[in-house]
Amino acid sequence: MTTRASLIRRGAIVLGAFVTTSALLAGCTGGGSGGGSGETTLDVMVGAQDLSDEQIAEFEADNPGIKINVVLYDATRLNTMLAAGDPPDITFGNAVGSANFNARGLAADLTPYLKDSNVLKEDDLQPVNDAFRWDGTKSGDGPIYGIVKDWSQDNALWYNTALFDAAGVPYLSDTEAISYDELLEIAKKLAVVEGGTTTVYGLGMEWQWSLYGPIAAMVAQQGESLFNDDLTKVDFTTPAAQRALQWFVDYGKSGAGPTSLNPLPDGSDFSTFAAERMAITQDGYWFGGNFAGDDALQTVRFAPAPTMGDTPVAMSFGGAGLWIPEQAKHKDAAWKFMEYFMAGPPAEARASSGWGLPSLKSLADKLPQELPYQQQAYQVVQGQLEHTVPLPDSPYIGAGLLQDTIDKYLQQAIKGEVSVQDAGAKLTDELNEALAQGVDQVG
Amino acid sequence: MARKWTRYPKRTFYAFVAPWALGFLLLTAAPMVYGFLVSLTNFDGSSPRYKWVGLNNYIELFGDPDMWAALARTLAFTVIVVPLTVGGSLGLAVIINRRLRAVGLWRTVFFLPSVVPVVAMAIMWKLVFNKDSGILNAILGVAGIPPVAWLIDPVVFYSLIIVMLWGLGGGMIIMLAALQGVPVELEEAARIDGAGRWAVFRHVTIPMISPILFFQIVTGVIVALQVFVQPLLLTNSAGISTVGGVPESTTLYMVQVYQEFFLSNRFGYGSAMLWVFFLIILGLTLILLRSSRSWVYYEVDTDAEREGAAR
C-alpha cells in the first residue's frame, strides 16, 4: 500500500523525528541563556547535599532573572565539561588541590569581584582560603581563585565511647595528642573479628579519600616535607616518609580497619561508624555535624590529631569550596550565587549545624555548643587551631593521581609483593615522572 | 566490455549512500584523525597550554610497564572469556534446541539475563559478591567454606569472568537460530550411515554452523578486548567514576586508558594508547579472518565468488 499520500506521511514522520532529536540534542548542551526573556540559567555543580530546594527557591526569589540548574558534582564529569569548553558556571572544588587547576589557567580570578562586593570581604576570609590563591608559580599568595565553604583539621579523630567501654579501652585525651603507634595498638584491641568477618573495625583512615594528606601530615610532624621547596619533586625514601608508609602498611596488614584491599562498600567511614561498626575514624570537625539529630549516635567524642613526631601538626586535607571556571558564561550571576552561598543563609546554616569550621571570621561564633559532644568538640577544635598548617599543594600533579599512585604501592606493600623501601622508591620514581610532565605542561 | 549498466542517475546513488558516508566521516573518521592529532601532543583535556610532542607518547608507551601489564591481562581475559562464551552459548542452544517441556519458558529464562541493563546487572553481582553480606559467601558458609573476598585482588578477575558469562543468553539465541538452520536431512543421512550423536554434531552440525561460530568469535574477541564498564562497576567504591579504585587484576586495557584520560589528565598519551590498541585489534581480526578460510564452511562458494568479482 505504497500510495503517494503514505509516502509523504512517512516522510513527515521522519522529518518530525529528526527535528525532535535535534531539539533534544540542542537541549542537552544546555548552559546557554534560557528563553528570550533575558533570563539566565546558572549551571551550579555541587554535591547532592550542598544545596536544598528551599535554598534554590530563596536565591531565585532574591535574584529575579537567574534560574539555578544543579549539576551533580563528579570529578570526571567536570573534566569532560571543561574539555568540551562548556563548563558549569560555578563548581565545587577543594582549596587544597586547586593549584593544579589554577596553574592550568582553568579558574577565573575572583579578586576584582571580592573588591566590589558588599557581602564577601577580603579581610573577613579565614587563612584557609589562602590555599585558593595562586601567584603564577605557587599557591598561598596572590589573586584568589575560589572561596572555601567550610573546613576542618582533617587528621583529627572521632570515636565511639560505647565501643571503647565494651573493649575496656580508656578514652582518648582532649588535649594531648596520641601517637600513631599507640593508636594502632588501640585499634587492634577495638577491632572485633568473628569467623573471618569483621564486625567492628578499630580505626578508619578514610582510605579512599586521602592518603596523601595523612602521610604528608605524618612527615610534617617529624619536621620534614614530602615535597622539595618548589613542589616539583617528591621523596618517599626519606626516613620520615618511610616511617609513615610503614605505619600504613602495618595498619593494612593488621586488618584493624578498611583499606583498598578490604574496602567499605560505600567508600567512606561514616555509615560504618554510625552503625557502631567502627570505633575510631580519622575525620575532621565537620564529621560531628552528622550527630546533631535526636536519633543520631549519642556516644561520640572528638580528639586531637595523632602525631608521629615531636611537632604537633593539624592539617586541612581539602577545604571544600566553590570556584568559577575561566570559560564560564555567566560569571556575574555565578558571583551572586557565591555571595549567597558563602555569606548568606546557607553559610549560617552550615556553621550552626557544626558541619565544618566556617571560612569567614564573621561566622566563627555560630558554631553549635548546645549538646555535650558539641561542647567537647568545640574545646578540642580550639586547641587545634594553633597547630594548623597548610598541606603542600603541588600545581604539577592532580589530587586524584597522587592518591591512586600512593594507593597502588601501599597495596603492593601490604600484600607483601614489595618491601616498604621498594614501594617508597617506586612511588618516588613514578610520581616524579608525573611531576616532570606537569612541569613541562604548565611550567 | 559491455557499456556501463545503469538504471538510476548517479545522484540517486550518492543520495542513498550519503547518510552512511556522512555518519562515517563525522562520527568515525573525524574522531580518529582528531585522536591521532591529540596523540601527538601533551594535551590535558582542558588547558589551552599544550605542546606538540611528536611521537614521544608512542615512544613512552613501549616502555610503560603498566600498559604492558594491562595489555597482557586483557589478552588473557579474552583468551578465557571468548571460548567460554562461545562454547557456553552453543551448549545452552543445543540443550534448548530439543523437545523439552515448556521449552519457551527455558529459552526466556536463559535469555533474560542478557536483556538486563549492564549497570543493573553489575550492581546485582556486586551485592552477590559482597564479602560480609553477599549471598555467595552465605552459601559457601553453609558448606563450611570461609568467606572469599570476591571483589578484591586477585579473585576479582574471576568474578569479572563470571559476570561476563552471565550474558550467555544473547549468544545462545543466535546459536539457536543457526542450529535450526541445519538441514535435518543431512543429520539423518549421517545417522543412517552409522554416525553416533557426537560424530553427527562434530562433523555435520559444527561445519554447518561454522560461519555463525566464526562471527561469534570475531565479535566476541572485539567485545572482550574492549571491556571497560564492567570492571568499573564491580569496583567497591562510592561512585561509578572512581576509576582509580579499580583493583589491579581487573585494570584491563580500556580501564587503563580511561585512567590516563580522566585521572592523569593525559589526553595525548591516552589517545596514543587507543591508536595502538586499534592497530592491535585490527591485526587480530585480520588473523582471524585469514584463519577462517581453513575451518569455516560457506554453502556458497566464496572462492568462485572472489574470482568472479576479480574478472
Image (tube, rainbow, N blue to C red):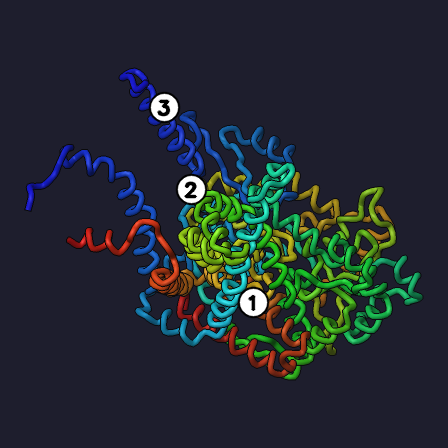
Q: What residue type is labelled 3?
A: Ile
**Viewer-proximal residue, A164 or B16?**
B16
**Viewer-proximal residue, B67 or B165?**
B165
Local packing at callout 2 (Cα closer than 10 Å; few below 14, some 14-19, many 20+) is many
Label disc, if present, on residue A329 of the rendered structure = 2
- Asked whether the viewer can see residue A114, the reply is no
Label 3 to label 2: alpha-carbon separation: 36 Å
Identity of the residue drawn at 24% across and 51% down: B305
Quadrant hosting residue A205:
bottom right
Quarter holding the N terminus of chain A is top left
Q: In this view, does A96 lie above or below A245?
A: above
What is the x, y in percent for residue A443? 41, 68
Chain-order first, disc 1 or disc 3: 3
Chain designation of label 2: A
The secondary structure type at the circle numbered 2 is: loop
Q: Is residue A305 above or below residue A152?
A: below
Label 2 to label 1: alpha-carbon separation: 31 Å
**Viewer-proximal residue, A309 or B10?**
B10
- Residue picked out by circle 3: A13
Identity of the residue drawn at 38% across and 57% down: B296
Chain designation of label 3: A
Q: How many marks?
A: 3
- Asked whether the viewer can see residue B115, the reply is yes
Chain designation of label 1: A
Of the two numbered discs 3 and 2 in the rendering, the one whose residue sits closer to the viewer: 3
Q: What residue type is labelled 1?
A: Leu
Q: Does residue B134 appear to the left or right of A54 in the view shown?
A: right
The secondary structure type at the circle numbered 1 is: helix
Q: Does residue B141 appear to the left or right of A361 in the view shown?
A: right
- Residue picked out by circle 1: A402
Q: Which amino acid does label 2 sit on?
A: Lys
